[in-house]
Amino acid sequence: MTHEYSQTEQFRGARIHVSDLAGLEIRDCEVGGLKIVDCYGGRVYIGGEFDHLVVNDVDVTGYVEAELDRRHPVRVVAREATNVDDYRAAWEMIEELWEAAIAGAKRLPESLLHERVDGEWSFVQTQRHLLFASDAWLGNAVLEEESPYHALGLPSGAMPADVVAELGLTLDATPTLDDVLELRLLRMACVRRVMTNLTDAELSRVCGRKPAHSYPDQQYVVGRCLKVVLREEAEHLRYALRDLAVLEGAPPTNLG
C-alpha cells in the first residue's frame, strides 16, 4: 500500500535511520539540506533544480548543468537571453524544436501520447502544462487578459486545490493531442507576436499582475515573465524528448 503525504511539514528536519525506503518518491518538495548518507540501492534518480549537488563528496553541480547544456543547447539560449534579439532568437529555436518533436509524437499511436513514463507527465499533459505556463506568465501577468486561463491548462502538482478551482482548471480532463495543440499553437502564436513587438523598454516594464494569486507578492517585470516562458518551454521539451524516446522503443504489446 502506498502512503501519500501532501503539503505537510512533518518530515522537515526528520532523521530516518535503518529503514526500508525502496521505491520512495519525493516530488515537488523543498529539499534544501537533504542528506542521504551511507545508503545503498540499485537505482537512484534525482531530478530538479539544485544550487549545490554533492554525490559521495564530489560536487557534481557544474558537471550536470554543463552536460545538460551540451545535450540541449536551447537551455543556454533561453537562460541567457538578455536583450530583445536574444528573446526572439530563443523563441524561434523553441518553436522549431517543438515543431519537430510534435511531428515525431504524431507518428506514435494516440494512446501512447497519454502514457506516463516513470510517473512523469504524458506528452499530452506536457502540452497542457505549457498551455498553463503561457496563460499565467504571458496572458495574465504580461498581457493582463480578461480571461487568461483555459480550463485544459495543467499547473504543477503543488498548486492548492482552491487555487485550481478559482482559475477554472479541469485537471481530470482527457483531451486528445489535437484538442490541446489547437490551444497551444494559438498561445505560441501569441508569444511570437509579443516577441516580434518587444522593445528594451517593454522588457523592464513592471507587470500589473502576478502570474496567479498563489504566487509570491513580488515585482514581476515583463522580461522575467517571458524568461519563465522560455525556460519552461526548453525544460519540458527536454523531458518530452526523453520520454518520447522511451515510448518509441516500447514493445508492440504496449500500443493499446
Image: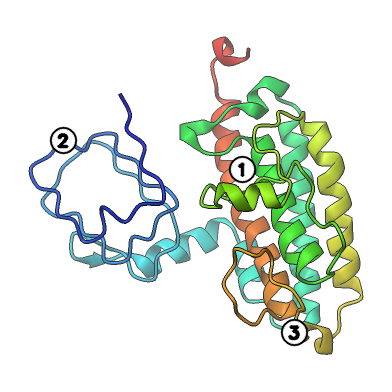
Q: Secondary structure at mark 1?
A: helix
Foreground of the two, 87 or 37 = 37
Disc on the earlier residue, 2 or 3:
2
Disc number for residue 109: none
What x and y, as percent, mark residue 89?
A: 78, 70
Which residue corresponds to mark 1?
240
> Is residue 79 rendered to the left or right of residue 206?
left
Residue found at x 60% / y 50%: 162
> Is residue 30 rendered to the left or right of residue 215?
left
Looking at the rendered structure, the kind of residue marked 3 is: Val
Residue found at x 69% / y 52%: 166
Looking at the rendered structure, the kind of residue marked 2 is: Asp
Residue found at x 46% / y 66%: 66
> Is residue 218 rendered to the left or right of residue 28?
right
Looking at the rendered structure, the kind of residue marked 1 is: Ala
Disc on the earlier residue, 2 or 1:
2
Say which of marks 1 and 3 sits in front: 3
User: Residue 155: in sight, yes or no?
Assistant: no
Which residue corresponds to mark 3?
206
Which residue corresponds to mark 2?
20
Q: CA distance from mark 2 to mark 1?
A: 32 Å
Q: CA distance from mark 2 to mark 3?
A: 50 Å
Q: In this view, which residue lies farthest toward the bottom?
A: 201
